[in-house]
Amino acid sequence: MSTAQISTPPKLQLDGLMLRYAVLVGLIAAASIGFGIANENFYSLTNLGILLRSISVLFLVSMGMTFVMLTGGIDLSVGSNVAFSGGVGVVALTTTGSATAGFVAALLAGMAIGWVNGFFIGRLRLSAFMVTLATFALARGLALVIYGADSINVDNGAFLWLGGTSWGNLPVVIPFVAMVFIALSVVLYRTVFGREVYATGSNFNTAFVLGRRPERTLIWVYILTGFLAGLSAIITVGRVSSGQPWTGLYLEFDAITAVILGGTALAGGRGRLLGTILGVLLYGIIINGLVLTGTNPFLQSLIKGLILLGVVLLDTFTQKGRAT
Amino acid sequence: MTGAAKLLREYNIVFVTIGLCLVFFLISPRFVSIDNMSAISRQIVPIGLIALGQFFVVVSGNIDLSMGMGSVLFAIVLGVLFGATGGVALGIIAVIVCSLALGFFNGALVAKLKLPAFIVTLSTLFMAQGLSGLIIPRGQQIFLMGDFFRFVGAEKFLGVYWSFLFLAGLFALAYVVYNHTRWGAYVIAIGNSEENAKLAGINVDRVKIGIFMFSALCSGFAGIILSSRMGFVQPGLDGNGLLLDGIAAIIIGGTLILGGRGTIAGAFWGLLFIGVINNALNLLNVVDVWHQVFKGAVILAALGVNWWLWQSRQAEAQ
């Protein structure tokens, strides 16, 4: 009986989630109209391209964070990991001159940090926020060491292609993100691994007793997040044609907010990738709008903090309302 | 397990810290001078306050990520009020009131609404960072000069900094509260099992709110002492580094992050360890960028060692 319960993707709660998605779409429309009035350039195709490109990294990282949060975990290290894996990739690229070596190095570096997280969280069962707080410091420190606290310019066309090229007004990275979304959706909804993710988040012990090896699932989920951080690093380097040690600062915070905004439960086991996409869009439009209107960065921090807390509070109250 | 091995296991951090001091002494004899020891004692005070506040939070099975940025915010509150009034009394009162308010806010959300502590304090971390840059004009420094700041930051009593005596006193007080009062037992009980604590008739919500108010108050004190030592405040100070150092200290000191276990003495040794490492990294001219690598690696290693110690104790108990 319980097998059926945990292995069913969350179709049961879909009504609640659908309502949420409708609200999110409405808010995205409202935010676009609002910023469209505040800034007449907002609607130009160029700006939409720039907007989508600037949040492409947030899309990737947030999708990884969705997997992590579905298992009931958290990954505070992704932002640092983007800087670290970018550094490894750029150094591999400049020393060997081969873009392939750069790609492979960046992805492997990202996955390595992910593995460390996964090992401590999955195998040793330590709390995710504590482990990833340590790798948050470790990966950022390693990035600073690799770069010698300075940025490195990159001029290899192949390496920069993904993040830097546009077809007309359409940056290449946007269809790429869409492809990653489709691939991850297949993994999450159509494979055994995807079910294990939901099972682990619903109840680790039940999953364990049922012989589902949730500890292994956890390790792979964090490796996947690291892999996506590596991809994000490649895109980031491509966007600005250089590798920078402080890139991705507080990216994890943005990703967590976007994922929660998209309806993924903090306790794990409930949520979908589509929600995360909508969450990133809404959050990205707001952040982009704040940047475009020249808001004081400290005020932006305050607003970000308020958004996260506001969404979490709203979730708590609406869920309480539903329960009674 | 033999007696000696057990001793080594239970007091590992003591041996490691002393061993480390010996190594640094061999590398650079300057390390064990009175001057340097005294410098370490002053450097560790803000970290120690963060560690002490965080200790109770972690033993109760939670975390307070807002402590570092909180300290920065409170330092700036102090600075702004000092700049406006020219006196410190109002500033100190404001810091205490603001920090207790922040702690109450964190604690109430965690206790009453059952929100995860890391999410609540992550968002208050950002709010604190934002506010710290908004209440002070952009890019401006406020210099803190006067008897009070010199007393807190630089004056000694019988060769020991007042600020270190304050920290030591607070640790002693915490030791008594943690080991010999009901409140300390409540914190451990909540960390072990909130359900059981509730069944035993403990007012879990009130204790939790108290824990977060104490941790925020500690970050307020840390802000006052840090800014007095530096002699100025400005937005963009490294609050997160302070937070990480504080957390590192208590984890190295053997506090179990799953909650319910930990000793004040362990936290103090962990603090000394972090102080010695920080000082040695500076003294040996290790390039700045390596510091953070070291910090992260040390926390990870300590997490692993704690886990292993915990397993071996469990095995022994059975």
Image (cartoon, coloured by chain):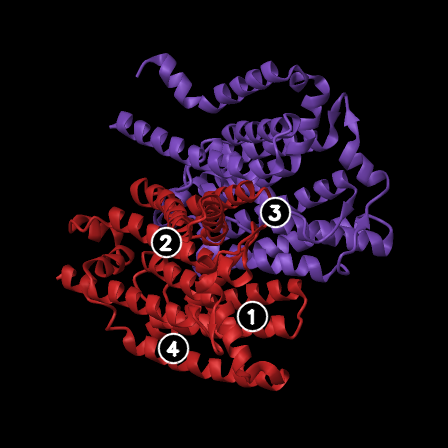
Chain colours: A red, B purple
For disc 4, the marked residue is: A20
User: What whole-number distance in Å separates the C-alpha atoms at marks 1 and 3?
Assistant: 27 Å
Q: Residue at x 35, y 49 (%)?
A: B199
- Towards the viewer: B181 or B210: B210
**Within-10-Å neighbours for mark 2: few <14, some 14–19, many 20+:** many
For disc 1, the marked residue is: A287
Q: SS of the residue at dot 3?
A: loop
**Within-10-Å neighbours for mark 3: few <14, some 14–19, many 20+:** some
User: What whole-number distance in Å separates the C-alpha atoms at marks 2 and 1?
Assistant: 25 Å
- In which quadrant is the N terminus of chain B drawn? top left
Disc 2 residue type (three-letter): Phe
Q: SS of the residue at dot 1?
A: helix
N-terminal of the pair, mark 2 or mark 1, is 2
N-terminal of the pair, mark 1 or mark 4, is 4
**Which disc is residue A150 wearing?**
3
Tag 3 subunit: A
